[in-house]
Image (spheres, grey):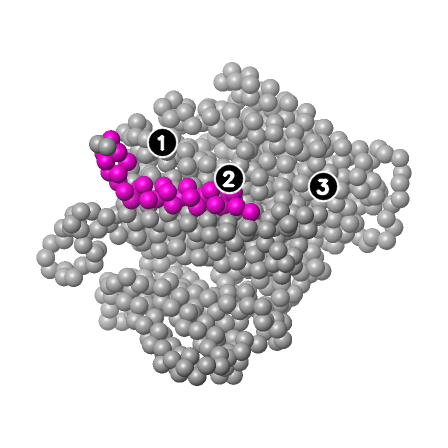
Amino acid sequence: MIQSHDSLVVQTLGRLVIPVIQLYSVYVLFHSQFGPGGGFVGGVLFGASMVLTLLIFGAGHANGLIEQMAFRADGLGLLLFLGVGTLCIFFGELFFDYAALQLPGFDPASRRSFGIVVTQIGVAMDISVVTVLIFFCLSPELEGSWKNELGA
Amino acid sequence: MNWVLETVLRRPNFLAFILLFLFGLHIMVADKHLIRKLIGMYLVQTGLMLFFITQGVKTGSTVPILLTSELPVQPAAYANPIPAALMLTAIVVGVATLGVAFALVISIYRQYQTLEEDELVRKMQ
Amino acid sequence: MRLNLPALLFVIPFLTAVALPLIGLFRKHWCWSVALASLSMMHVMSLMAFNHTLEMGPIRYPLGGWLPPIGIEWRLDGFSGLAMVLISLVALVAVVYAGPGVRTTLAHKAAHLYTLVMLLISALTGMVMTADLFNLFVFLEVTALTGYALVAVAGGRAMLAAFRYLILGTIGASFYLLGVGYLYAATGTLNMADLAEKLPGLWGSTAVLTGLVFIIIGLGIKMALVPLHGWLPDAYAHAPEAISPLLASLITKVALVALARIMFWILGPDVIWDEVPVMVYLGWIGAIATLAGAFLALSEQNIRRTFAYGGISHVGLVVMGISLGNLTGFAGGIFYLMTDAVMQLGLFFVAGAMASHYGVREVAEVAHLRGRTPWMTAALIVTALSMVGIPPTGGFFGKWYILMGALEMKNYVAVGVIILGTVLTLAYFVRILEKMFVEGSTVTRQDASDLPWEMRFGMGTVTAGLLLFGIFSDPVISFIRTVAAPPGF
C-alpha cells in the first residue's frame, strides 16, 4: 500500500494545489485549437495530478476510486476516439471526416471543431489512465487485490 | 575564423542537433548500465525534435494562430506549424517507448537485482 | 462501404485491441475467440478489398476528407492489397496456433497478450497501407513497441533480449525519422506521391541523398539486414513459444514491404540504378546477408536461433532479388517474401511445438522425437524443402524466378550467391533432419501427449500453403508482374 505523507504542510498544500492542476489540465484540453495544448498535454497533466494525489494521500484514498478507474478504464478513451471516427463512416463520409456527424444546427466547420474536441477528450482520458497505470505498475508496493486485478 | 563563422555556425540549431544526437547515440551504444542507455535514448529523441522544430522557424515570424478571419492571410508571416505538430506525435511515441523500457528495466531489476549489462549476462548463463 | 475498406481494415483489429481489456475483466477465456473472430472478419474484408482493387484500380483514401498533399492519405493498390491478404491470413493462423500455448503458460495475462497481438496486427496494417512518410514512422514505432512487449512476456532472459531489441529498434526508428526530416527540409512535403513528383530535380542535393541513406539504415535495422541484425536471434530465440511465430513471420517482412514501397514508388525504377544507385549497393548488401545468415546458422545449437538466422538469410535474398533491376527479379523477390512469411511461420510452429510439448530446444535433442508426431514431421519436412528450394514447394519457385532475373541481367555474382546460399541452407537443415531420422535409436519420450488441434491445424495450413504456393506460382508471379508492379518498370 502506498502510504500517505505524514507532513501536514504537504497535505494541506496538496488539497490546495491539486484541484488547480486539474482545472488547468481541462483548460489546456479545451483550448487545443486556439493555443498550444490538446489531448496529450491535458491528459498528462490530469494524470500527473492523480499521481500527486496518490503520493500525498496514499492509495486507498476515497475508497480506492483512482485505482478502480485506472484498472477498469484502460482503453475507454481510445474507444471514444475510434468510435467518433467510425461513426463518420456510418454516416457516409470518410474515416474521421467529422463534417458527417449529424448534429442539427451546426455548419460543417463547427461540426469538425466539435469532432476534434471529442477526440481530444478521448485521448486525454486514455493518457491520464495510462499515466496512473504506469505509476502503479512500476511501484514496488503493489500487493493484494490490485496485483490480482492486473494479473501480474 | 571566417570559415568557422560561415559554414559551421551558419545554422547553430543544426550544430546543436548534431551534438545532442551523436552524444546520445554514443551513450546508448557504449554504456553498460541500462538506465544510462535510456538517458542516451532520450537525448537522441530530444535532438531529433530540436532538428524538426527549428526547421519551421522563419525570421520575424509569429505564432501560427489566426486571430481574425477578415483580413487576408499572409502565410509568410507565420511560423510553419507542421513540424511542431509532427513532433507532438513523436514526443508521445518517445514517452511510450520510455514507458515500455522502464517496465522492462524494473522487471529485470526485480529478478536479477542488478542493472549492469556484464553482470546480467553472467547471471543469465 | 467498399471505398471505406482501408479504414475498416485498420479499425477492426484496433477496436478489438481496445475492447479486449474490458472483455478480459469479465470473461478471460473469451479473449482468444474474440481475437479470432475479428481476424477472420479482417481477412474476409482484405479479400474484398483486394478484389475491388483488381476490378477498379487503387483506392486512394484521404483521412478525414483532407486532400493530399496537406492531409494524410492511405492507398490500397495491388501491392498493398496483396500484403494485406498475406498479413491477415498469417495473423489468423498464428493466433489459432497461439491459443493452447497461452492457455497453459500465460493464462493470467491472456487479455493483455491478445491486446498486444491485435495492436501489432493493426499497426502492421497501417504500415502497409499508408502513403505518408510520417504516418509510416508512427506505425513503425507501434509495431516495434508491441514487439518489444511481446518478446518480454516470457520473462527471464527474454527481458534482456527485449531490452536490446528496444535499444536497437529505437536507434532504427530515430534514423528513419531523421531521414524523413531531411526529405521534408528539402522538399516540404511528406506525402509519397507528392515526393515522387518533387524529388526528380533534386538528386544533386546532399540533404536528399543523406535522407535516403538514413531511411534505408532505419528500415534496415527494422528488417534485420546484415550487419544491422544483432537484435533478432536473441529476441526470437527467447520470445514465448506461442507468440514467436507471429513475430518472426511478419515484422521483418512488413519492414521490407515498406522499403520496397519507398524505393520503387517514391524514387522510381528509372533512378535507383543510375543516378541514385542505392539499389546497386543494396544488392551487394543483400548478397552478403544471404551468405552471412546461412553461415551463422551453421554453428548454432539452439533450434529457434537457427531458424532466426535462416530468416535473416532470406531477408537478404529478397533484398537481392528486388535490387536486380528487372521486373522478373522484383516479382521473384516479392513472391519469395510472401513464401518466406509462411516458411518462417511453419518453422517457428514446429520449433514451438517441439519446445513446449516435448521439451526439445537444442538440435542434439531432436532425436527424442522420432515417430511421435506425423503432423509436425510433415510440416518440418515440407518447410525444410521450401527453405532449401526444392520443387514443388514455393521456395523453389521464388528462388527460380530470382535466378531467372539475375541471368537476364547477366548478374553472375547473384547466381553464385543464390546457389551457395541454397547449399548452406541444405547443410544446416540436414543437421536437424539427420538427427530426427537417421541416427541410431535413442530414448524416445513415451510420456508426452498428442499435440492440440490448434497446433496441428496451424502446421497443416502451413504445409498446404507452401505446396499451393509452389503449384500456383505461375499465376501469382504473373499477377505480381501486372497488378502489383511499381509504375515505370
Sequence-wise, the earlier of marks 3 and 2 is 2
Residue A103 at least partly seen: yes
Q: Residue at x 39, y 71 (%)?
A: A46
Please indicate whether residue A150 sits to the left or right of residue C55 in the image. right
Chain containing the residue with disc 1: C
Chain containing the residue with disc 2: C
Q: Which mark is residue C221?
A: 2
Please name whichever residue, C313 or A83, is drawn nearer the observer in this view of the structure.
C313
Q: Which mark is residue C274?
A: none
Please name whichever residue, B69 or A3, is drawn nearer the observer in this view of the structure.
A3
Q: For mark 3, what is the residue?
A: C302
Please indicate whether residue B45 sits to the left or right of residue C316 in the image. left
Which class describes the residues within 10 Å of circle 2: few (<14), some (14-19), or many (20+)? Answer: many
Chain containing the residue with disc 3: C
Q: For mark 1, what is the residue?
A: C209
Q: Residue at x 44, y 73 (%)?
A: A52
Amino acid at dot 2 = Ile
Q: Residue at x 64, y 35 (%)?
A: C310
Q: Quadrant of the N terminus of chain C?
A: bottom left
Magenta highlight on residue B6? yes
Please name whichever residue, A21 or C438, is drawn nearer the observer in this view of the structure.
A21
3D distance between C-alphas at marks 2 and 1: 19 Å
Label 2: state its secondary structure: helix
Which quadrant holds residue C234?
top right
Question: Which segment is the magenta one?
Answer: B3-32
Q: Position of residue B38 (x, y in %)?
A: 49, 52
Compared to residue C349, the image places residue C488 above or below, namely above
Callouts 1 and 3 in the same chain: yes
Amino acid at dot 1 = Leu
Magenta highlight on residue C214? no
Compared to residue C459, the image places residue B63 above or below, namely below
